[in-house]
Image (cartoon, rainbow, N blue to C red):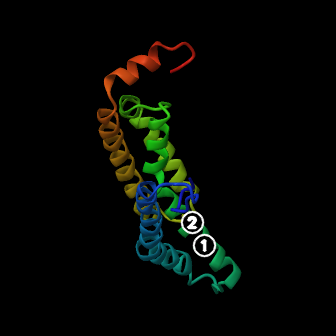
Amino acid sequence: HSLLGARPESASADSGRAKIPEGVRFAAGVVFIYYVVLPRALDFLTNYDDELYDIQIRASYYYTFVAMTLLGGGLAFLMPIFVLALVKLRILTSTRLRQNRKVAFVILLVFAALLPTVDPVSLAFEIIPLLLLFEISIWAAVLMERKWPAESWEEELAEPGTW
């Protein structure tokens, strides 16, 4: 199965329905960045020290900046899916996510700073949704773990070489 809703022909109709939210999440990230973050970032970039400089924007730089920012925002909104995949693989647990919340916040801050962000306001508009998505991921992991029967955890933990 792939991330954005494409699925092999052999996949059932139920698994196809489960993939629709991934595309919606990616689109929500792109829309959020386009309407909330980009206007503020572009305003800052085009007005910073404008009395000292004659600012001329090259189309190639503009399109690259916008495309990379939109892609980063779309991928950022897929974070709950990546976290839940790690929970499903039993690499992470909701308990571990909660215990390492501060570390995750620092990682998310670094990720937001790596997006083409130039000012603290844009960074704040990027980090707040990431933090909310991380919290949603924790609660989704809790719900996912509650659905699993307790016996499956005990069986896997009893097997040598498993986490």
The answer to whether residue 64 is above or below residue 58 is above
Q: CA distance from mark 2 to mark 1?
A: 6 Å
Q: Residues within 10 Å of mark 1 (few under 14, many from 20)?
A: some
Residue in the picture at 50% in, 21% down? 163
Residue in the picture at 42% in, 76% down? 35
Residue in the picture at 57% in, 16% down? 161
Quadrant in the picture for residue 96: top left
Q: Nearer the viewer, residue 153 or 47?
A: 153
Q: Nearer the viewer, residue 52 or 137?
A: 137
| Callout 2 amino acid | Leu
Secondary structure found at label 2:
helix
Q: Position of residue 84 (x, y in %)?
A: 43, 43
Q: Are marks 2 and 1 in contact (CB under 8 Å)?
A: yes
Q: Position of residue 6 (x, y in %)?
A: 55, 62
Q: Please name the residue that numbered disc 1 is placed on.
A: 67
Q: Please name the residue that numbered disc 2 is placed on.
A: 71
| Callout 1 amino acid | Ala
Q: Residues within 10 Å of mark 2 (few under 14, many from 20)?
A: some
